[in-house]
Amino acid sequence: MASPTSVVKTCSFTKILPAVFVILFQLFFFASFAQRVINGVVRDAKGAGIPGVTVTEKGKTATTITDNNGNYSISVSGNNPVLVFTSTGFKPQEVAINGRSDVNLTMDENVSKLDEVVVIGYGSQSRQKLTTAVSKLDTRVLENATFTNIGTALEGNISGLQVQSTGGGQPGAAPRIILRGGTSINNPNGAAPLYIVDGVIRPNGLNDINGAAIESIQVLKDAASTAIYGARGSNGVIIATTKSGRPNRTRVGYTVNASLARPLKLMEYASAQDYIYWNRLGVKAAAVYNATLINRLTQANGSGTGNDLTNATAFTTMYLSPANQFKLGQGWQSMQDPIDPTKTIIFNETNYQDLIYRNAFTNDHYLDLSGGTDRATFYAGLGYLNSQGIAIETNYKRLSFNLNGSYKVTDNFNVFGKLQYTYRTNKTIANLANLFYRSASLPGTAKYTFEDGTIAPGQNSSIGNPDYYFTGPYAPKGNTADETTTMSLGGRWTIIKGLTFEPLASIFRESTPVYSFQPAALLNGVGTLVTTRNQSASNNGVRQYQADAVLTYQHTFAAKHNVEIKGGFSHYFRENTTLSASGQNAATDLITTLNAAGSPTAISSTISDLIIQSGFSRINYDYESKYLLSLNARYDGASNLGEKNKFGFFPGISAGWNVYREKFYENLLSPNTMQLKLRASYGVNGNISGLGDFQPQGSYTTTSLYGGQSAILSGQIPNENLKWEQSKTLDFGADVGLFNNKVGIIFDYYVRRTDNLLTTVSLPASTGFASVFTNFGSLENRGVEFELNIDVLPSKSALKWQMFLNAAKTSRKILKLPFNGIDKNRQGGVLVYDPSSKSYVYMGGLQEGGRVGDLFAYKQLGIYATDADAAKAPIDNIAASANKTRYGGDVQWADLDGNGILDSRDQVYVGNPYPTWSGGFNNFLTYKGLSLNIRTDFTTGNTIYNYPAVIANSQAQGDALPLKSYIDKMWKTPGQITTVPRYTWQDQSGNIFKGNSTYYEKGDFLAIREVSLGYRLPESLVRRAKLSSARISFTVTNLHYFTSFTGLNPEDGGMDNGHYPIARTYAIGLNINL
């Protein structure tokens, strides 16, 4: 037996080395495939962490879920494993580790329109099963821009929804929103949709809602989707949902936007020298029609020489003399008198339009806190907005607070409560027309100050010095405030599996105090101080109670038949109150309240209420998500209709077919290549929005008769036969998804007929009433709507590009009017000569088969180059002057019937105020932390009457500046060929003001509504600052309008009334989350 020592001696090193090498290789091999830990953060496009994201190692069982802040940690195996990230509402993504230990990811939202969930009446539904016309706002448009009114965010984003910025750049101004052309025959622009926020009807729309608190906005468009709202849904329904807290996630966020606004475009008026030169010649030319006008040349007016240096005259134009020669050394100008070249006129020039506008600053702050547990969630938001207007003395402030909370009382019963409070003040000019196209055109020759340094008033309060009438001690004092409070309490009780009961009760209150005071001032221009001191105060209130109770049953039979049955009851009460008083002759300007008035002039108060009680139901059915059917109905009773017509029944039916789920379809096309759904709907809506609370019963008013005795008189004719206005809509649609839904198409064609239209009808003077409210005729709207969304680049591309296009065409036709014995039951209109039939026909107005709103004017063919050419003109029976002679430089009007006489029958069609096409084109691009949003919108087919240009060029307000373009292009010398007539003071020649076709302009425009560049700060920097995310942005709003319209606002409906100009806004924003 060998000894141990001998055994060791026989084990050579060369035999041990291979064994050691094998052991080391095995250790290295196993180590390379041992599990290791990967950490990271998953964020959304805004940089906020996403909780609940499932993180899985591809092909393995290792799985984890991100925490409240998006953090995760997972153990993986292999040398280069791949992680798969999935979460509802986001696109799934795969990421190779490539040896990293920290893997952070930004997930992209699933923007496919065909996969989204939309809110509908009393519930929500997947678009896959949706059978009606519903559009959803992409809330990315709310991220960067400061919206003083959230309604403007809808502009160009919803097909068939036209948003007109009639308030221009006025902060806080509510836009006019019209869906599918509206249902009004007399005022299609006035048919507002129904607004619902968190289940509560909002009588004032979205005016007081802070956009930062909005989670989603849906627009219900066809009658089948809005029928469940019955009497309120004929003009469409806009549903907004505010943000709520999420379980197991606590988050603090702060957003601030600071912006600078400037007028996008202003009128360009003639210089003071051009004004004096041509106005004096224009007065001489006008004296042919009225000989007394020649006296204006020597009177105290904008171009007259009767002014002096005293406070008794308002203008600076005067002949040069030794007494005033020193003014030339103080910046005054001089020129040769075009009437008497031997004399010199001196004057001082002030650009009064420059005094009206300013650079306006806005700051908008929003602080929110949200979070919760498995049983309770909360969300609180506090906002403050202070927005200057680009016009002097205009300002809008808003303080808002919203609180949403929910609590899981038991496993089958949840309660929730919502509170919204807003306090707004809106400082504006009482008469914007005086400011924007009267004072703006005050001749530059008007004195800004008198010789003693006191500020001068200009011509008068209608066309005066802005710094006198709108700012300073002589300006009207006043303010408008608005306070709204909404409180709602609801619950969800799951009685048994599939059966739920959801009650909701809410209170809405609004109070609007307004006051005004006019200090003693030179309201009529230089001269006597007016000490009337008119003042007024009012307070309008709205009190609304709403209660809804909804029972829902959902069940799936045989794993294929899915049924949802919903029934409910709704009670709505609204009370309007008004209280107003006015007075005058206060003893001082120091006390502006109404109690200081020496003489009360009026006092009034009203109380009116409306009650609507309703029952409603809906049945949704689908077979394997393939065949879809929806039935809904509402039975409404309204207190403001006659006893026999109080109740109305409004049903709706819709059906859909997901063709791509058929087996035969799979043999034709892969569902990933093309998904196709066809749908159709029909529904009936009611409308009483234009009806007063006591219209059927009539109304009474008080008046003072002889001897100071008061009496009660009938103020309104009762009409107990008033009934529901009804709209019946047929809608055909298709939803298409191409290439795995990278391209989505939504198409709708609709026909809507509205019968028993509620409107006023004029009455003969012999009745003692101007009009009566009645059901009046039928109107038809037809249209097509198209939405296209494209995920342009491959899914794996680092650059993401989503493109959205929508367009809608709308046409309106009057089908029926009350019988009146006239052809086509015409009301109003113009008798004109029709060259095609060579006969006189009535056009415009309201007539069966006609359109709503057609415009007619006298057609300008050209300008007579010489007096000899003008001698051939037809006799002008439209001219106000007794002198019918036409001269060189006058307009050559079209004599349509060739009878040698120009009269009202020679008018031609010049357009329609309502657009034919409207839509928008939006692009969203993201690359790593960078994002670029470009939003545009357009309208075509409408005509706008450029009234401010007419007012300026015709001097309709007395001494006013004409436009520079008019002076540059107008006829000046015999033989000149131009398209602009000669200058006569106050258009005595009748070339402009009576309805010249050249002032009816195309309103087509393409607006670059918003360009926004954002940057999400790197995670390393954010973590050092102990933040969850941070993002900065730069946004330009109303960057440019491509339009041929020469006025200020191409969005005006039919007539540019000199409204608040559009503002271009530059905003810098910061958003941080803790």
Image: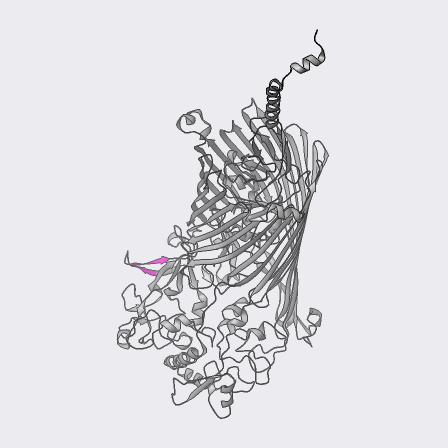
Which colouring convention does the figure follow? one colour
Q: Is residue 38 above or below residue 22?
A: below
Q: Position of residue 929 (x, y in %)?
A: 55, 47
Q: Position of residue 28 (x, y in %)?
A: 60, 26
Q: Nearer the viewer, residue 895 or 124?
A: 124
Q: Nearer the viewer, residue 397 or 74?
A: 74
Q: Is residue 1072 above or below residue 361?
A: above
- Residues in magenta? 832-848
- Residue positioned most to the top: 1
At 71% from the left and 31% from the top, the residue drawn is 411
Q: Is residue 28 visible?
A: yes
- Residue positioned most to the bottom: 322
> The N terminus is located in which quarter?
top right
Q: Is residue 901 above or below residue 81?
A: below
Q: Is residue 13 above or below residue 1040?
A: above
Number of residue marks: 0
Q: Is residue 879 visible?
A: no
Q: Nearer the viewer, residue 230 or 265?
A: 265
* In the image, residue 932 lies in the stretch drawn in magenta: no
At 62% from the left and 21% from the top, the residue drawn is 20
* In the image, residue 835 lies in the stretch drawn in magenta: yes
Query: In the rendered view, does 977 fall on the left or right side of 447?
Result: left
Q: Position of residue 179 (x, y in %)?
A: 49, 48
Q: Position of residue 1013 (x, y in %)?
A: 53, 52
